[in-house]
């Protein structure tokens, strides 16, 4: 049985441009093993979206320390009809052998709860891909 043994959570906003580029390439190496049809430029635009209020990305690793998946959570704040809202967008990909182990949902739910605790009166919407 394959399982995730460790993880690393990264806030892309804290990375230098060089470190961010390296991180994008590392993450894309996982992504292309799971999904077809998206080049690294498109991938970087979606997963490292600079329009988000904040983003957190978790890399899941096996016991050898190899990356086997990721989960990116982004928060966007907006005002619609005088109402303050927050939209969460979650993107995830994990190698087939590591799926269905509860690794992903606990991460993004925890991040959403932390954010919501700081902004309790904003309506919240969630989009997952």
Image (cartoon, rainbow, N blue to C red):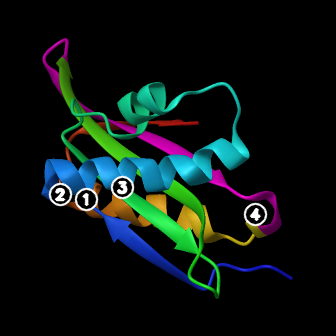
As measured in the structure, the alpha-carbon distance from the residue carrying label 1 to the one carrying label 3 is: 11 Å
Q: In which quarter of the image is the N terminus?
A: bottom right
Disc 1 versus disc 3: nearer the observer: 3
* Residue 12 visible within the image: no
Residue 102 spot, x, y in % from top left: 67, 70
Marker disc for residue 15: 2
Crowding near the residue tagged with mark 1, few <14, some 14–19, many ≥20 C-alpha atoms within 10 Å: some
Residue 17 lies, with reference to residue 89, above or below; the image says below
Magenta segment main secondary structure: strand
Q: Is residue 92 magenta?
A: yes
**Residue 50: x %, y % from top left:** 22, 34
- N-terminal of the pair, mark 4 or mark 3, is 3
Q: Name the residue under label 1.
A: 11
Residue segment shown in magenta: 80-97
Look at the image and tell me whether residue 21 can be seen: yes
Which type of secondary structure does the marked residue at label 4 adopt?
A: loop
For marks 4 and 3, give the CA distance. 22 Å
Q: Are marks 1 and 4 in contact (CB under 8 Å)?
A: no
Mark 3 sits on what residue?
A: 23
Q: Toward which corner of the image does residue 86 lie, by quadrant?
A: top left
Q: Who's the residue at 69% across and 38% down the image?
A: 35
Q: In this view, does 29 lie to the left or right of 16?
A: right
Q: Residue at coordinates 82% horizontally, 66% vertically from top-left?
A: 97
Provide the secondary structure element on which disc 2 rests.
loop
Q: Earlier in the sequence, mark 2 or mark 3?
A: 2
Q: Tell me the residue that label 4 is attached to.
A: 99
Kind of element beneath mark 3: helix
Question: Are discs 2 and 1 less than 8 Å apart at CB?
Answer: yes
């Amino acid at each position: 049985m394959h399982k995730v043994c460790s993880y690393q959570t990264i806030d892309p906003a804290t990375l230098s441009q060089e470190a961010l580029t390296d991180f994008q390439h590392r993450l894309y190496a996982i992504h292309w093993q799971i999904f077809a049809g998206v080049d690294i430029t498109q991938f970087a635009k979606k997963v490292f979206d600079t329009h988000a209020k904040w983003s957190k990305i978790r890399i899941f690793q096996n016991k050898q320390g190899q990356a086997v998946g990721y989960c990116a959570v982004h928060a966007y704040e907006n005002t619609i009809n005088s109402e303050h809202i927050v939209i969460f967008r979650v993107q995830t990909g994990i190698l087939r052998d590591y799926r269905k182990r509860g690794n992903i949902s606990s991460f993004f739910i925890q991040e959403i709860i932390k954010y919501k605790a700081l902004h309790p009166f904003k309506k919240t919407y969630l989009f997952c891909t």
